[in-house]
Image (cartoon, helix red, strand yellow):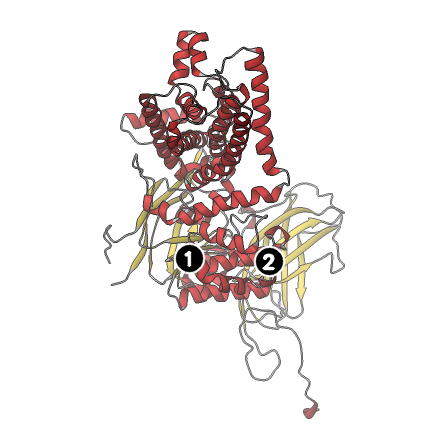
Amino acid sequence: MADIILKCENLSKQYRLGTVGTGTLSHDINRWWYKVRGKKDPYLKIGDTNDQRKASESNYVWALKDINFEVQNGEVLGVIGKNGAGKSTLLKILSRVTSPTTGVIRTKGRIASLLEVGTGFHPEMTGRENIFLNGAILGMTKTEIKSKLEEIIEFSGCQKYIDTPVKRYSSGMRVRLAFAVAAFLEPDILVVDEVLAVGDVEFQKKAIGKMQDISSSDGRTVLFVSHNMAAVKNLCTRGIVLESGESIFEGSSEEAVNFYINRQSSLNTDNLLERTDRKGTGEIRFSKVELLNRQGNAVSELISGDYAKFRLHMVFNEKVNHKDLVFGLVIYDNNENKIADFYSDEMGITFHSIDSYVDLELPKLMLRGGSYYVVVVVQTAIRVVKQIDLLHHVLNFNVFSGDYWNVNRANRATNVALIDAKYLNQNTL
Amino acid sequence: MKTTNDDLLYSISAEQKLIDFNFKEIWRYKDLLFLFVKRDIVTLYKQTILGPLWYLIQPLFTSLIFTLIFNNLGQIQTGSIPPFLFNLAGITAWNYFKECLTGTSNTFTKNQAIFGKVYFPRVIMPMSVTISNLLKFSIQLAIFFGFFLFYWWQGSTVALSGLVFLFPLYVLLMALLGLGLGMLISAMTTKYRDLTILVGFGVQLLMYVSAVPYPLSEARLKFPPLVARLVELNPLTQITEGFRKMLLDTGSFTWTNFGYTAMISVIIFLLGLVVFNRTEKQFIDTV
């Protein structure tokens, strides 16, 4: 029998939109009056789902709606979703910072949250004193902290400054110290929100390693929220995908990440004019972006090293009077890593008049095998950069591994750029 | 794969019982309480050089002004007790209550940053304020005893009363009352900020109806009967009177009044605790 440590049942959270303060008293009185008569809260009915693109009709919105999931002991659950999908709200409820509007979370273990490192640090106190204070805030007892004090100091790498007030610390040191305290917490369930995005690369590695230790060797349950798909894939055993406050997928972390990516790429790429998730002033709007091969045919798959041409179609809403237009095209891989960007200004070209499209030619598409997507932008280059149109996920394409070096061997498909190079070996010359 | 509710440690939901304390949990966080107290005390001295000195200046000058206005100008009789010492005793007691009340009444608004990030029993925060204020109180009490000895040496008839054994209880009652009222106000300020403004001058006004600058006997003589009655019913009046009774052996003390004060204090404290607990779950959305 699987050992369920945390169970989330029909969890919903409602927020009030707009300025809280106007009419709260009358709503409160109204609520109270309904309650007195034994009726349900009248404001719970009129909530909308949390679609931030559309203006809401009512003043209340569901940040989370009917979330159900179970977490087993020792599992690392990744929560993924776009900004505003409700990830942070879910974590806030889990860490008991706020309570749900309806529904319940039942848990068998102590939950400790790492929503932000360094909560409650006092600048006037020394590093050592702050370890105790921060540890206690996170739920450790004094004896627990004492027994781990040496390890914490060691892990933070702040031995030299441990008796110096924290206000004299660099921001990096502060973060390291804070993470160190949190890393040595021993809760049954650890809730982590993007803390890995702090510190330098070396420390990030250390942090990820520690997270892996916590889950794998200590068998602790971890709930992890991140935008970093690679980290979710690596760390998590299972994943759930949130969208507009609703849970739309649950499965293995691999499946969840793929689902999320496919969901992103299922955005309309045929007629970009119908898309509403764009930014910019809108005088020019991209209508379609195509990937063409050497023969000029639109394709969605290419082989590493192939000739490639991106064709950016656009429409002009008004008579565009812009001189010096700058086009940009950015290639991302499926883990949301930026692989390459092409901005026309730095390539020595600014546009003054355009027909209906602009081409970007890549004599050799130096990408290894994998799935990629494209972001396009057009902006003015006159002193102040002003975005005219910016659109994500305008085109998805796959690259198949080729044999770039002509040695009868397919290049590794590692989702990174392929760079022309040659090993020189004295003996073979 | 069925889990019964018995083996689950706790649940997070919107349901609330009227009285819903988890004393076990508060006990588990006792180290945090002491660390907060330590933080308050340690950082108090680190911030300023004159810091502790202000605790001497404030009551001394207030007592001086009170003596000038109420006793010299206003002809309030303090019996055989030197008016300055009389006022100092009242102000020392009053200050502790006031510090507890004002220090805890902004708990939620002042700590939003930390409350919004991590959970611990919120009640730890106002409790720590109440405890760390004891330091201030003892400094001011030491000043009082300094002047007490000075007047005694000068030949004034000042003496402690036999009731001085009640001293710790009185301090506890003040703490309960200040904490209780502070928690009530802090819970309400999360939604209605008007109360923060009210606290500022409300405390000032409260002092004048709590028999701080005058003895209760004078109030009975000179106030309109209704006001005198109200002043007498004010539990804070009983506390200041009780303090002066213990330390200077002046004023009125009855066990009935003591019991009445204790009851009111406990009730207000419990009420504050209930309201505070109900607020802590939701406040981060409304603050």
Which residue type carries mark 1? Thr
Residue B8 pos. (x, y %): 28, 52
Residue at point 32%, 23% (across, down) = B255
> Which subunit holds the residue at mark 2?
A
Residues behind callouts 2 and 1 on a single chain: yes
Instruction: Describe residue B236's horizontal placement relative to residue B74 as left or right.
Output: left
To which residue does mark 2 refer?
A: A173
The reply to whether dot 2 and dot 1 touch (C-beta < 8 Å) is no
In this rendered view, identify the residue nearer to me: B176 or A110.
Answer: B176
> Which subunit holds the residue at mark 1?
A
Q: Is residue A104 above or below residue A20?
A: below
**Helix, strand or loop under label 2:** helix
Instruction: Describe residue B129's horizontal placement relative to residue B270 as left or right.
Output: right
The mark nearer the N terminus, 2 or 1, is 1
Residue furthest to the bottom: A427
In this rendered view, identify the residue nearer to me: A26 or A115.
Answer: A115
Instruction: Describe residue A45's horizontal placement relative to residue A380 as left or right.
Output: left
Residue at point 24%, 63% (across, down) = A1
**Residue A405 lies in what quarter of the image?**
bottom right
Residue B104 pos. (x, y %): 47, 34
Can residue B130 be seen in this snapshot? Answer: yes
In this rendered view, identify the residue nearer to me: B113 or B248.
Answer: B248
Quadrant holding the C terminus of chain A: bottom right
To which residue does mark 1 refer?
A: A143
Which residue type carries mark 2? Met
Q: Is residue A100 above or below residue B67?
A: below
Label 2 Cα neighbours within 10 Å, binned few <14 / some 14-19 / many ≥20: some
Residue A173 pos. (x, y %): 60, 58
**Helix, strand or loop under label 1:** helix
